[in-house]
């Protein structure tokens, strides 16, 4: 491997480290503290879940802007700056005392999420590696798949040592020291020897043309429809996993272990994808992932107070969902091309992030209507709709290939 190749590989691992820490403390922290906030703040579950909804809606609004800046070659500032903003907002969250301030801080966290989570990171990697981006993305997600485990375990430990407000300050410092430099310098290394920034007006014109061309293609709309179903499914289950399990008579300690299992299973799913990626098409793997997630919801529905079934749910849910983090950008590049990928991916992120945004609040609303049994049934139905959408994408792709012959 050349010296440049070694530096770019180091950059990939740095991005993986940065993504792990930043996902843990500006995204998964919501699920890790939801039950604690409900107990200590005394606010309604629906009011609390609006926080993550506001955050991800803000992230969705920021995504197209972040994609354009990455296409201009400003990825280091987008990822590094976004992570720094997230750290500041996380520290600010420790001082909130009313629901309106809580929502305002989560809006700032959302702006940070739109700049430094997977979508912008994968846009940086795709811009840097082109057709060889998928292995690099897989390496990043292998590490970052442990983010939820890092969050749930450290949050549980921290709550035994101190209160949640002090814990957030500690997590903000950790993220600032580890994630911010990792994302900034990781981007610098992977973009080594890439062309310097193009003029902003030139990039904007190229982005606009690429996005307009993409949205005329039915594949764009199939992708825009399929993965939001997964976002709704996983977003509901992830953010309500602690109360879901405790309602089903599973002890809090066991519930923490079950929730912490989802992250390693995401890594396991990605390892399996690496082993079989040359044998199985991305579409086939995507359809299988949606089907397994649907089965996972059925397992959780029948779990009752049995920890074994709860852990089986975590294995299935984590393993299948872990695949989609890689398959979503892979399918986007495969069906819509790699030129101006940042902008196209940024627009596709809008419905996906919007779905993730409404997921926790939607779960709370469904819970108010019929309890968590109905919530879990709804997640199974969403996964089934995802299977149908992937099948439709396959049919559209097949029809397009026939026309081109």
Image (tube, rainbow, N blue to C red):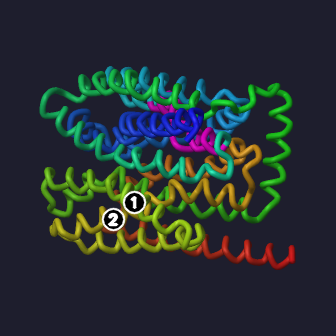
Q: Where's residue 170, x and y in %? A: 28, 23
Residue 344 forms part of the magenta stretch: no
Disc ID at residue 322: none
Residue that appears at 75% across and 43% down: 340
Q: Quadrant of residue 310?
A: bottom left
Tell me residue 119's x, y (percent).
57, 44
- Main secondary structure found in the magenta portion: helix
Question: Within 10 angstroms of label 1, few (less than 14), some, or many (20 or more) residues?
Answer: some
Q: Quadrant of the C terminus?
A: bottom right
Mark 2 crowdedness (10 Å alpha carbons): few <14, some 14-19, many ≥20: few
Q: Which residue in the structure is indicated by mark 2?
A: 370
User: Along the horizontal axis of the image, is 248 left or right of 217?
Assistant: left
Residue 157, horizontal then vertical, whole percent: 17, 36
One can see residue 343 in this view? yes
Residue at 76 percent across and 47 percent down: it is 339
**178, above or below 223, in the image:** above
Q: Eyeballing the image, is 117 above or below 177?
A: below
Q: Helix or strand or loop: what does disc 2 sit on?
A: helix
x, y (%) of residue 15?
A: 48, 36
Front residue of 320/353: it is: 320
Q: Are marks 1 and 2 in contact (CB under 8 Å)?
A: yes
Magenta region, residue range: 106-126
Q: Which residue is mark 1?
A: 366
Residue at 39% over, 45% down: 143
Compared across the picture, whether 234 is left or right of 371 comes to right
């Amino acid at each position: 491997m050349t010296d440049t190749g070694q530096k770019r590989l180091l950059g990939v691992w740095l991005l993986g480290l940065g993504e792990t820490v930043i996902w843990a403390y500006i995204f998964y922290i919501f699920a890790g503290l939801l039950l604690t906030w409900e107990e200590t703040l005394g606010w309604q579950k629906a009011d609390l879940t609006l926080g993550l909804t506001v955050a991800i809606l803000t992230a969705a609004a920021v995504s197209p802007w972040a994609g354009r800046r990455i296409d201009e070659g400003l990825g280091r500032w987008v990822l590094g700056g976004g992570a720094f903003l997230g750290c500041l907002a996380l520290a600010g969250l420790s001082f909130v005392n009313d629901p309106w301030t809580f929502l305002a801080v989560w809006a700032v966290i959302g702006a940070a999420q739109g700049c430094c989570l997977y979508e912008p990171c994968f846009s940086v990697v795709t811009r840097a590696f082109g057709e060889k981006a998928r292995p690099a993305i897989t390496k990043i997600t292998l590490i970052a798949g442990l983010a939820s485990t890092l969050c749930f375990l450290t949050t549980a430990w921290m709550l035994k040592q101190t209160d949640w407000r002090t814990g957030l300050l500690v997590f903000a410092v950790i993220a600032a020291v580890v994630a911010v430099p990792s994302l900034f310098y990781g981007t610098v290394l992977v973009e080594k020897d890439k062309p310097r920034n193009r003029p902003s007006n030139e990039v904007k014109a190229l982005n606009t043309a690429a996005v307009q061309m993409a949205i005329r293609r039915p594949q764009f709309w199939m992708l825009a429809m399929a993965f939001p179903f997964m976002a709704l499914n996983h977003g509901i289950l992830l953010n309500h996993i602690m109360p879901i399990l405790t309602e089903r008579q599973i002890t809090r300690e066991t519930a923490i272990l079950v929730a912490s299992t989802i992250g390693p299973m995401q890594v396991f799913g990605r390892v399996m994808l690496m082993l079989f990626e040359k044998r199985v098409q991305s579409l086939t793997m995507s359809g299988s992932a949606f089907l397994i997630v649907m089965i996972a919801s059925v397992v959780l529905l029948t779990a009752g107070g049995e920890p074994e079934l709860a852990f089986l749910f975590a294995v299935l849910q984590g393993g299948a969902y872990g695949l989609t983090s890689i398959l979503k950008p892979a399918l986007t590049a495969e069906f819509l091309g790699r030129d101006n990928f940042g902008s196209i991916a940024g627009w596709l992120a809008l419905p996906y992030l919007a779905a993730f945004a409404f997921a926790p609040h939607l779960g709370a609303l469904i819970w108010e209507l019929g309890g968590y049994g109905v919530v879990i049934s709804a997640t199974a139905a969403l996964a089934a709709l995802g299977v149908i959408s992937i099948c439709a994408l396959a049919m559209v792709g097949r029809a397009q290939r026939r026309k081109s012959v």
